[in-house]
Amino acid sequence: MPFDLAQLQATHKGAAQLLHRQHVNPKWMQALKLIGFDHEYVRAESQYLWDDKGNRYLDMIGGYAVCNVGRNHPVIRKALTDFLASGAPSMVQFDAPILAGLLARQLKGRVGRDLDRVFFTNSGTEGIETAIKFSRCATGRPTMLYETGAFHGLSTGALAMNGCESFRKGFEPHPDHFQSVRFNDLSSLECELAKGNVAGFVVEPIQGKGVNVHSYGFLAEASSLCHRYGALFIVDEVQTGIGRTGSFLAIDQEGAVEPDMVILSKGLSGGYVPVGAVMTRTSVWEKVFSRLDRAIVHSSTFHMGGLAMVAGLATLSVYEDERLAERATQTGALLRNGLEAMMPRFEFIRAIRQRGLMIGIEFAKPTSLTLRMAWRMIHALDDNLFTQAISIPLMQDHRILSQVAGHGIPVLKLTPPLTITPDDVTDFLSAFERTMIGLHRFPGPAWDALRRIAVNSIRSSTASPRANTESDAAQAAAEWLRADTQSNEHVEPHG
Ligand code: PMP
């Protein structure tokens, strides 16, 4: 019998989690269950997902900032199905695919800045690996600089530039010649550049982990510092690009930034087909592809794949037609205003960081005594637990997907499709407000739910309240947990 996708899916309805537990990543399944994110989504449209029970969810994660145009956009879907139906060849390798030429020209038209050559990739990480190679080749120098708190991917080279210890741990030794500089600190950058061995400095205009925004002027000054010391300035716009922050690139709002490379991915895919692009100066390109026998010295099998190029071209067209950057600016401002208006009422909220629809809500130790104790207890258990106390009820009680993304600093992150509406913003704000009201009552049901998560997480990881936290908080946390441990309760977060 020929392959029948619909039949395959129909005969395996409801089996997804079991299949993943058996064949893919059981630990991830366990984690999803623990936080109540273990739904089976069967349909998606723009900023909404539907599960197998017909419930609708508002997606404020957007597939980690992939679905800028919204999921299953009809224009992109049609372009992809048209391409498939056309019988056009893809990945001939010994040819010049027209769609790659068209996409490169379109990207240049939007990015400008003398970034005249485009290397296509299959992911953001691959773009970073490309930038490492190109920087070393173009400068003849070894060292790559990155910022503390940075996230550039998880392959070997990209991981060596990852500023989050939790990702690096267990994968040592990391390759040599990667050096971190302090986030947003020009003197730290100059100190390393002055050593004269730096090939390039890779920087996210806004860091994805924590939504950390540089001071205005930092990126422009950093680019001129790099050039003064003969290093390349490389902007990782994998997450911030394609309208996410209210302009095509985030650096479009940052003054005279002069990148030697810009790396794009995520949003360019239209949420459909992996694609990325490294845009670089001709001078860099010519150092890499310097002779006929080096014409494909850097390449990969799937780069410039037909479907990926179609997804990129159709995405750029939708981006333009639907004025997505403008909409990101407008709805982003609505979200920010709404969140800022809540700050005086909720002592847990420390800061709102926002550019377009890239938003980080940072929490901090409250001022009142009871809440302070609750905060310290939670942090004695796990740094990320408090933010989960917000993302879990947002999902459980309001069917809203949001992300914990601070790495040590409690930050709730939002990167929804750029298509969210003012009504979605209102829904999110009221759900967030109700969640915060719940958390400002201690003891109370919001904290009880958190305790159950902590108990289950401790059961499954053999972790215990951390020894390095204030001892009274650790002791209180242990006592707080004990009641639940003895009752042998199980977390059923969305039961
Ligand atoms: N750079 C940045 C700024 C990112 O946010 C990410 C992904 N989160 C990457 C690089 C890696 O991209 P990918 O997951 O597509 O490999």
Image: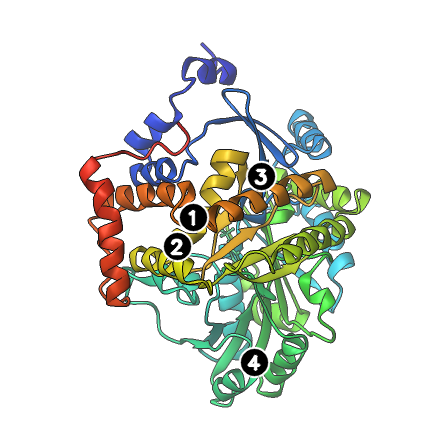
The local secondary structure at tag 2 comes to loop
Residue 122 place in picture, x, y as percent: 53, 48
Ligand 1 has an atom within 8 Å of the beta carbon of the residue at disc 1: no
The N terminus: image quadrant: top left
CA distance for labels 3 and 1: 16 Å
User: Mark 4 and mark 2 in contact (Cβ < 8 Å)?
Assistant: no
Question: Which residue is the site of mark 2?
Answer: 384
Where does residue 381 sit, x and y in percent of width and height?
A: 30, 55
Q: Earlier in the sequence, mark 2 or mark 4?
A: 4
Q: Tell me the residue that label 1 is attached to.
A: 388
| Residue located at (74% from left, 68% from top) | 113
Q: Nearer the viewer, residue 463 or 438?
A: 438
Q: Is residue 481 above or below residue 76?
A: below
Q: How far apart are labels 4 and 1 at the CA level? A: 41 Å
Q: Amino acid at mark 2?
A: Asn
Judging depth in this view, the residue of 312 and 168 nearest the camera is 168
Query: Dot 2: few (<14), some (14–19), or many (≥20) neighbours within 10 Å?
Result: some
Q: Which residue lies under the disc numbered 3?
A: 59
Residue 274 makes an appearance in the image: no
Q: Position of residue 348 (x, y in %)?
A: 50, 58
Real-space Cα separation, disc 3 to disc 4, in angstroms: 40 Å
Packing grade of label 1 (10 A; few <14, some 14-19, many >=20) is many
User: Disc 4 designates what residue?
Assistant: 231
| Residue 45 appears left or right of 75 | left
> Contact, CB < 8 Å: mark 1 with mark 2?
yes
Specify the amino acid type for callout 4. Ala
